[in-house]
């Protein structure tokens, strides 16, 4: 092999080494999260004015790196799920009726996702939406979990939630969270009777 050919081989190996090192460095750099789903979906209409917005990520996010902006402006109370993969945004006051909102999610100060949605036009639509959610809940009754149970009493139009184990308050929160996961943001719109099994109260 001539000196010229050797030089080309060394240069080629050097370039390959640089590429490998670059790829290794990139693979260890933290990846930006991406939004995998939202509630409501972008472009949706007839969103209830008292519902929470839910943003689901593909990985855990850092709270101090996550910000959001809503236009027109509405004060939002934001909370992250325990695994930090879901962001819940609850309006402190109800969204305005028949209004288009644009929500922008930012991570480390850079735009990550934009979500546009429109609220219902009238309160009649809101009542119809609540009826739909309520009927969906009734269709899943009775519900029996290890730490709580829920049943619906047609005679009194009442959901009875029985806490079966301690800690009582934590299990109440879990029962409420399950109901909200079915599309209901405000439990006060349902007639709910909370019951704690006698031995837990002793």
Image (tube, rainbow, N blue to C red):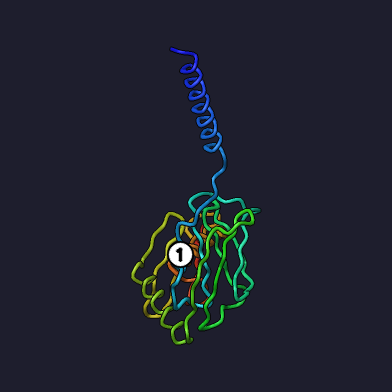
Give the residue at x 57% y 61%: 105
> 174 or 92: which is nearer to us?
92
Q: Is residue 161 visible?
A: no
Question: 177 and 6: which one is in front?
Answer: 6
Local crowd at mark 1 within 10 Å, few (<14), some, or many (≥20)?
A: few
Rendering coords of residue 94 (x, y %): 57, 78
Closer to the camera in the image, 20 or 103: 20
Quick one: which residue is furthest to the top in this view? 1
Snapshot quadrant of residue 144: bottom left
In the depicted structure, whether residue 128 falls above or below residue 91: below
Residue at 42%, 62% in the rendered image = 149
Question: Residue at label 1?
Answer: 181
Is 125 positioned to the left or the right of 102 in the image? left
Q: Name the residue at 63% across, 53% down.
A: 108
Q: Is residue 19 left or right of residue 91?
A: left
Task: Please state the horizontal and vertical placement of residue 60, each as a whole percent of the image.
Answer: 54, 49
**Mark 1 residue element:** helix
Across and down, in percent, residue 54 comes to 51, 64
Can residue 52 be seen from the camera position used here? yes
- Name the outermost residue toward the left: 139
Q: Quadrant of the C terminus?
A: bottom right
Quadrant holding the N terminus: top left
């Amino acid at each position: 092999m001539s000196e010229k050919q050797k030089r080309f081989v060394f240069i080629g190996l050097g370039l390959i080494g640089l590429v490998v090192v670059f790829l290794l460095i990139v693979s260890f750099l933290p990846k930006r999260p991406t939004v995998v789903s939202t509630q409501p979906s972008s472009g949706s209409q007839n969103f209830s004015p008292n519902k929470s917005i839910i943003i689901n990520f593909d990985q855990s996010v850092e709270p101090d790196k996550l910000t959001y902006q809503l236009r027109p402006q509405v004060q939002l109370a934001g909370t992250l799920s325990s695994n930090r993969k879901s962001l819940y945004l609850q309006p402190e006051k109800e969204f305005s009726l028949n209004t288009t909102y644009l929500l922008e999610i930012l991570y480390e100060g850079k735009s990550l996702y934009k979500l546009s949605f429109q609220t219902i036009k009238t309160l009649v639509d809101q009542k119809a939406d609540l009826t739909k959610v309520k009927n969906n809940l009734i269709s899943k009754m009775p519900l029996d979990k290890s730490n709580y149970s829920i049943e619906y009493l047609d005679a009194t139009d009442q959901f009875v939630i029985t806490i079966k184990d301690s800690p009582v308050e934590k299990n109440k929160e879990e029962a409420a969270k399950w109901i909200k996961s079915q599309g209901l943001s405000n439990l006060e719109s349902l007639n709910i009777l909370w019951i704690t099994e006698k031995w837990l109260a002793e």
